[in-house]
Image (cartoon, rainbow, N blue to C red):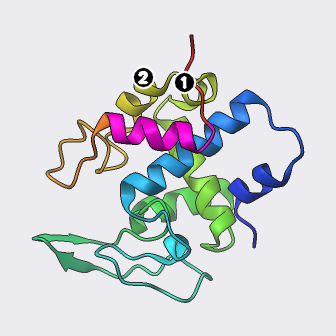
């Protein structure tokens, strides 16, 4: 399956809102350490899984933390189960990982901010969803806001005036 991001990229003309969403998703993947060709196959701690038929639900202990986080957006198994049911996702494919991430952004009431280019507001609203975002407070590798903003802009995102 083709990730939602790549479907947006292939379109001839994307709206500013679509560009901002694509850039924000890319920024999350960068922040989570999954911005690579294998990003959609990443397990917490850096290992890879091969079967996209379902979330791998592989608990891994690293750096004193045990997590089932997997995929491009490092979604926990329990979160995936909820999203899979709600969104009727049939597998853990890249496209469905993108859909799940967009739903997580929406659930945090940040989707309008993302699409409008209100980057700082969106980060604040999403930081409890992704441990790598600044201010998340989970004691993990939080990225610096300036680095994330740079990635967002390189990925085609724009900041609201």
Element class at badge 2: helix
Q: Say which residue appears at 64% left-offset and 72% top-offset.
A: 93
- Count the marks: how many? 2
Residue 154 sits above or below residue 62 on the image: above
Q: Above or below — where is 91 with respect to 33?
A: below
Percent coordinates x, y for residue 161 in the rendering = 56, 10
Asked where in the image residue 43 lies, by quadrant, the reply is: bottom left
SS for tag 1? Answer: helix
Observer able to see residue 95 = yes
Q: Residue at x 44, y 75 (%)?
A: 42
Instruction: State if disc 2 and disc 1 touch (CB < 8 Å).
Output: yes
Q: Please report the residue visible at 38 percent of the width from the left and 63 percent of the height from the top.
A: 33
Q: Residues within 10 Å of mark 1 (few under 14, many from 20)?
A: many
Q: Is residue 35 magenta?
A: no
Q: Nearer the viewer, residue 32 or 67?
A: 32
Residue named by callout 2: 121
Image quadrant occupied by the N terminus: bottom right
Q: Which residue position is annotated with label 1?
A: 113
Predominant SS along the magenta part? helix
Is 7 on the left-hand or right-hand side of 5?
Answer: right
Residue with the most extreme top position: 161
Left or right of 22, for residue 121: left
Q: Give the image location of residue 149, x and y in percent.
A: 43, 35
Q: Earlier in the sequence, mark 1 or mark 2?
A: 1
Q: CA distance from mark 1 to mark 2?
A: 7 Å
Residue 14, by quadrant, is top right
Chain part drawn in magenta:
146-156
């Amino acid at each position: 399956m083709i990730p939602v991001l790549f479907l947006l990229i292939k379109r001839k003309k994307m709206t500013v809102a679509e560009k901002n969403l694509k850039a924000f998703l890319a920024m999350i993947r960068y922040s989570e350490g999954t911005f690579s060709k294998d990003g959609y196959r990443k397990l917490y701690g850096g290992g890879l899984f091969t079967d996209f038929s379902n979330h791998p639900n592989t608990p891994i202990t690293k750096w004193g933390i045990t997590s089932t986080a997997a995929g491009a957006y490092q979604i926990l198994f329990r979160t995936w189960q909820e999203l899979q049911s709600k969104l009727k996702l049939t597998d853990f494919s890249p496209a469905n990982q993108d859909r799940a991430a967009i739903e997580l952004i929406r659930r945090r009431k940040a989707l309008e901010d993302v699409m409008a280019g209100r980057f700082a507001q969106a980060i604040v609203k999403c930081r409890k969803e992704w441990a790598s975002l600044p201010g998340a407070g989970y004691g993990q590798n939080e990225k610096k806001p300036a680095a994330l903003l740079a990635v967002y802009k390189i990925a085609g995102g724009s900041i609201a005036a």
